Image (cartoon, helix red, strand yellow):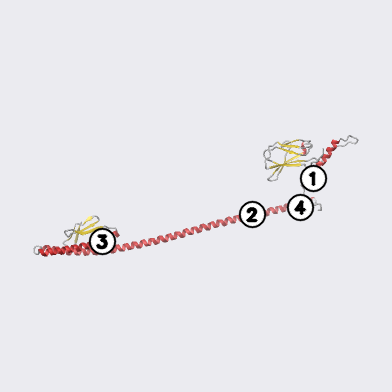
Amino acid sequence: MVVSNTTSKVTYTGNGSTDTYAFAFKIFKDLDLVVTKVTIATGDEEILALGTDYTVLGAGDDDGGSVVLTAGNLTSSYRLVIQRILALTQDVDYTPSDKFPAETHEEALDRSIMISQQLKEQVDRCVQSSVGGEVITSEELIELIDDAADSSAASQAAQAAAEHAQSDAEAAQAAAEHAQADAEAAQAAAVVAQNSAIASRDTASAQAVIATAQAGLAATARIGAEAAQDAAEHAQGDAEAAQAAAEHAQSDAEAAQAAAEDNATVASGSAASVTSMYAAVSAAQAQANALLGLGIGGSSIDGNGNLIMTYNAATVTSIEINAGGELVINY
C-alpha cells in the first residue's frame, strides 16, 4: 500500500438522524480508532467506548471504513471526532537469513508513516515558537499559559465589570424614567387641584350671588309687606269713615232723600276710590305674597258697595265696623 493520504482525523456535526460516520484512512484493527463526542456549547469531551457506544466497520481496508453509533443518533448539539491513534510500537521481528516478505516490510513502513502522521496532527495543535525564535522549555510554556489564563481572567473580569456598569446604567435610566413619570403625575395632580380650586371659587361666587339675590328678594318682600300694611290701614280708615257716613245718611234718609241720593253718589265715588285703593293694596299684597309664598287672589267692590276679597281660596263676603269701631272682614 502507498500511504498518500495524510489525513488521520475526521470531524462530523450531528443532525439528529445519522448514526453511521465514514472515515477515509486505513486502520489495522478496530482499536486503532479513538471516537470522541464533543458538546458544542461547552467544549466538554467524552471518549466513547468501543463495543458499548459504537462499532467499527472496514478495519484493514485501504480505503477506510465507518463508525456506527449504538447509543442512537447524534443531535446537532454535538460533534463526533474520529481519529486514528496507533500504539507507538514496532511489531515486525526480522530474523537473520530468514525470508524478507515485501508485504510485511511495507506494512511496517506504512505503520511508521501513520504514526508520524498522527504525531504531526498532535504537534499542529500545540503552541510553537517562530522558526528563528528560542526554544521554549516546558516551564516557560506553562508560565506563558498561566499568563494567558491570567490575561483571559482579567479580560473576563473587565467584561463582567463592563456588563455590571451597563446594568447599573440601565437601572439608573429606569430610575430616571420612573422619576420623570412621578413628576408628570405630580404635575397632573397639581392641574387637577388648580381646577378644583377654580371650581370651588366659582361655586363660592355663585353662592354669594344667590345669597345677594335672596337678600334683595327678602328686602323687596319686606317693603311690599310694609306697603301693603300701610294700604290696609288706610283702607280700614276709609272704610270706617264710609261706615260712619252711611249710618249718618241712613238716619237722615227720611228727612232729606235728595241729600241721601247725593251722599249715595259721594259714597259711590268713595267706593270707587276704595276699589282703586284696594286694587293697589291687592297688587302690593300679591307682590309681597308672591315673594313670601302667600296667596291673596284679589279684591273688588260689589254692586251694593261691599268689599269682596279672595284669600287662599276663601271669599270675603262682607266688611263692617263693629261697636268698638273695628273693621271686621267676614269670609
Give the residue at mark 4. Answer: 144
Between discs 2 and 1, the one toward the N terminus: 1
Q: Earlier in the sequence, mark 2 or mark 3?
A: 2
Tag 1's secondary structure?
helix
Picture disc at residue 164? 2
Amino acid, disc 2: His
Quarter that holds the N terminus:
top right
Q: CA distance from mark 2 to mark 1?
A: 44 Å
> What is the distance, in whole Å, between disc 4 and disc 2 at their CAs?
29 Å
Q: Secondary structure at mark 4?
A: helix
Q: Which residue is mark 1?
A: 120
What kind of residue is marked 4? Leu
First along the sequence among labels 4 and 3 = 4
Badge 3 element: helix
Residue type highlighted by circle 3: Ala
How many callouts does the rendering have? Answer: 4
Residue wearing tag 3: 283
Answer yes or no: do the residues labelled 2 and 3 have beta carbons within 8 Å?
no
Inter-mark Cα distance, 4 to 3? 123 Å
Residue 90 visible in the snapshot = no
Left/right of residue 229 with respect to residue 56 in the rendered view? left
Q: What is the residue that sits farthest to the top in this orientation?
A: 99
Question: What residue type is disc 1 on?
Answer: Lys
